[in-house]
Amino acid sequence: MLTFYNEHHAQHRGRHEMFRGALVPCFEKPERVDMVLAEFERRGLGKVVTPHGVSLVSLERIHTPRYLHFLRNAWSEWVALDEANADKDAFPSVWPIRGMRTDIEPDNFAARMGLYSMDSGTPLTAGTWIAAKTGADCAVNAAHALRLGERGTFALTRPPGHHAGADFFGGYCFLNNAALAAQHLLDDGARKVAILDIDYHHGNGTQSIFYGRNDVLFISLHADPRGEYPFYLGHASETGDGEGKGYNMNLPLAPGSTPAQWFLALESACIKLASFAPDALVVSLGVDTFAGDPLSSFALQSSDFLRIGERIAHTGLPTAFVFEGGYAVNEIGINVVNVLEGFET
Ligand code: SP5
Ligand code: ZN
């Protein structure tokens, strides 16, 4: 499987994230992608290539210009506040809650960090922009390769993307790689594209980006947001808005759901996919559904990931896999590559 990878991902290396009143080591770390790359190469699954850089204009197909401008300059602004900041990650500490103004961009840096984010678990670091941008390059290149005739491609990226919206970061995500891939497919001539999000967490960013549209079907299998991040989106009742009505499908699962229950939900997703009949599929591939994952209550085994790949292949759709979450670093390579191998065989 043709894979796009960029070593700049390692420049995004958060020191800490906020959790229960303490700064704890980041779960989302460079070793995640290193492990997947090593396993992919060990199993000889295909070529790994460095993507071509895409223009900022193509990022603006999904993200707002003012958000991209902020993200590109955030680290230098942070260090300009106090040169000692160069040794600390930047975190938001204040957010505009209901009823406050989000149309006026504040001058104050902390205020803009809050305007453009959704949580305090997502450190912004010196290398965040370069890692996120070259990660987005991977996703767009993986999409483009489908248009050139590849059957399956893989964007081996981090930071992940599915929690990032048009103008906010959060959940370890900054640029929405899956949304950028789907939009690129449409801009290159596809008429309809589906996104299947199998990360443990709901892809709130992707949902919000396409919620009013009928050219992108978004389907997500995830832990019920009543109990799990991102909490405020991901319910079954969210089916789309306006022209997008019927083009959003959430399949929330109770905490502790079994692999059998998970695979039943995957079957519902595949039936919906077939009725939409897209020209191509983007998979938000998170493997934090694994039994050994520190952030998850699901119990998929490594062998289950082979079955996931096989089931996705059975849709017969040209498919771009985009890497999302998964924090059991020792098994992350096996789990991700199992999906890809299941798809290929
Ligand atoms: C892409 C992705 O998977 N993002 C997930 C973001 C989850 N953020 C909340 C993490 C809460 C950390 N909980 C620690 C539990 C330790 N047992
Ligand atoms: Zn996740």
Image: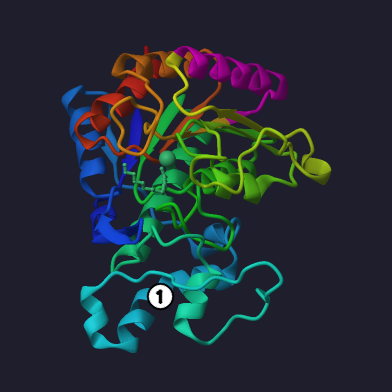
Residue 83 sits inside the magenta stretch: no
Q: Does the beta carbon of the residue at mark 1 sit less than 8 Å from ligand 1?
A: no
Q: How many marks?
A: 1
Q: Name which quarter of the figure residue 200 lies in.
A: top left
Badge 1 crowding class, 10 Å Cα cut-off, few under 14, some 14 to 19, many 20 or more, is many
As drawn, 118 above or below 238: below
As drawn, 197 above or below 68: above
Residue 277 sits inside the magenta stretch: yes
User: Who's the residue at 35% across and 80% down the image?
Assistant: 78
User: Who's the residue at 65% across and 40% down the image?
Assistant: 189
Q: Position of residue 313 (x, y in %)?
A: 48, 16
Please give the residue where the numbered disc 1 appears in the rendered image. Answer: 74
Q: Quadrant of the C terminus?
A: top left
Viewed as shown, does residue 187 lie left or right of 133?
Answer: right
Q: Which residues are magenta?
A: 260-280
Q: Position of residue 276 (x, y in %)?
A: 71, 25
* Residue 344 at least partly seen: no
Is 131 or 152 nearer to us in this picture?
131
* Residue 190 at least partly seen: yes
Q: Quadrant of the N terminus?
A: top left
The furthest residue to the right: 242
Q: Name which quarter of the figure residue 132 lies in.
A: bottom left
Q: Main secondary structure of the magenta part?
A: helix
Type of amino acid at the residue the image marks with label 1: Ala
Q: Position of residue 12 (x, y in %)?
A: 28, 59
Is 55 or 213 nearer to us in this picture?
213
Q: Position of residue 195 (x, y in %)?
A: 57, 34
As drawn, 249 above or below 29: above
Kind of element beneath mark 1: helix
User: Who's the residue at 53% across and 62% down the image?
Assistant: 168
The furthest residue to the front: 21
User: Who's the residue at 40% across and 53% down the image?
Assistant: 172
